[in-house]
Amino acid sequence: MAVAEEKTSPEKSWHAIVLQTLKRNDIRLVPYVPDRVLTPLIKNLHADPYFTTFATAREEEAVGIVSGAWMGGMRSAVLMQTSGFATLANVLASLAVPYQIPLIMFVSERGTLGEFNYGQSLVCRTMRPVLDSLAMEHHTATRIDEFEFIVDRSIKQAVTTQAPVALILSPLLTGGKVFDK
Amino acid sequence: MSSSPVRNTKVMNRFDLTSRLVAKLKHEEAVIGGIGNTNFDLWAAGHRPQNFYMLGSMGLAFPIALGVALAQPDRRIFALEGDGSLLMQLGSLSTIATLKPKNLTMVVMDNGIYQITGAQPTPGAAVADIVAIAVASGLTNSSWAADEDDFERLIEQSMSTTGPTLIGVRIDDKPGTGTTRRDPVQIRERFMHGMGVREPL
């Protein structure tokens, strides 16, 4: 029995790592705009009473909420998809960066490695130039064996340096979204 | 045929109403001032460490206030927002209605114009009713203030209600009275002191 379980889950899933690392870093508030790839993470966050998690109408709304929560003493993270990140340039440049808010973003990456929607592939190309133009810390997670290290260290760095961070979840890590799904 | 909403409400003044609100604050309540004139008048009404002033991110006064309200459920949080700003983020009303923070009071300063950019009418000026939008978004405890006394009554009432309150006020086309010092790090750090999250250096 135990052997069979081991075979079906030889290692922790990426979403289990996110959930556990959020918890370990005292991050309780997780607003999101959903994404297909993020579904298991969102489901498990809702199922865990440790977290306050809910959908917002727009990604910048979620950024406003977590900025207020940080200033009130509560740690948070935002979940979104690539196209949602593309709506954030104004709020990053006028709230998160200048006010020095440790905004922690998990971005499910669409638009590359098998994208089937041309618009998604174009919007994906705007993401890293926007992050780089604001000199924002960002990492693209591709390997499960590095993932916990990247998430844990990035959260701690965001909080201690009071600077936003974007953790981009590559299809290499998550499997991504493909046409037949 | 006119589709203009009927508003049997007095046209008031943003600075006067903001001053009336601030005068009622005795328990280190937080106040989030939206972009532009809304936070300029909050600044002019007398700086408090519990005030947060937005220098950008138009439309996010209510979401920021929601975040503070969730982090500090025992503190009353007020948010001041303009009608033009709110039109950018109407979805946030539904989010707030769903979460039902019991400690959040929202005030919409409605002059129907983007005063600060040259007084152009908002797209909703002639047709939209902000309070009706709020009610339809699920914020059932939303109402227009008929006059200054009614505004003060609604503010006081909101402090003891069990859910979020939205108060719409019609205001004139006057610009803000003061100008907030534009130092975002200082604004944020002072506010965190005011919220008891940080000790002063």
Image (tube, rainbow, N blue to C red):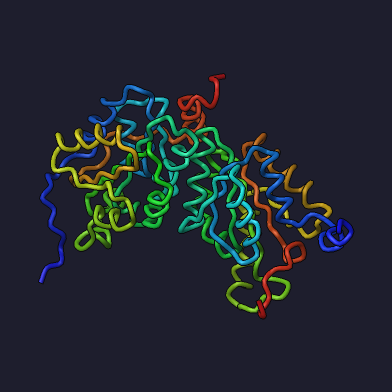
Q: Is residue B68 visible?
A: yes
Quarter of the image with the C terminus of chain B is: top right
Give the x, y percent position of residue A108: 65, 61
Residue nearest the viewer, comparing A61 with A88 = A61
Quarter of the image with the N terminus of chain B is: bottom left
Residue at the right extreme, as displayed: A3
Give the x, y percent position of residue A59: 51, 56
- Tell me where residue A44 sits by quadrant: bottom right
- Tell me where residue B109 sits by quadrant: top left
Q: Is residue B116 left or right of residue B4?
A: right
Residue lying at 12% horizontally and 68% vertically, measured from the top left: B2
Give the x, y percent position of residue A21: 71, 44
Q: Is residue B119 visible?
A: no
Residue lying at 86% horizontally and 59% vertically, measured from the top left: A1
Residue lying at 14% horizontally and 45% vertically, measured from the top left: B11
Give the x, y percent position of residue A129: 64, 59
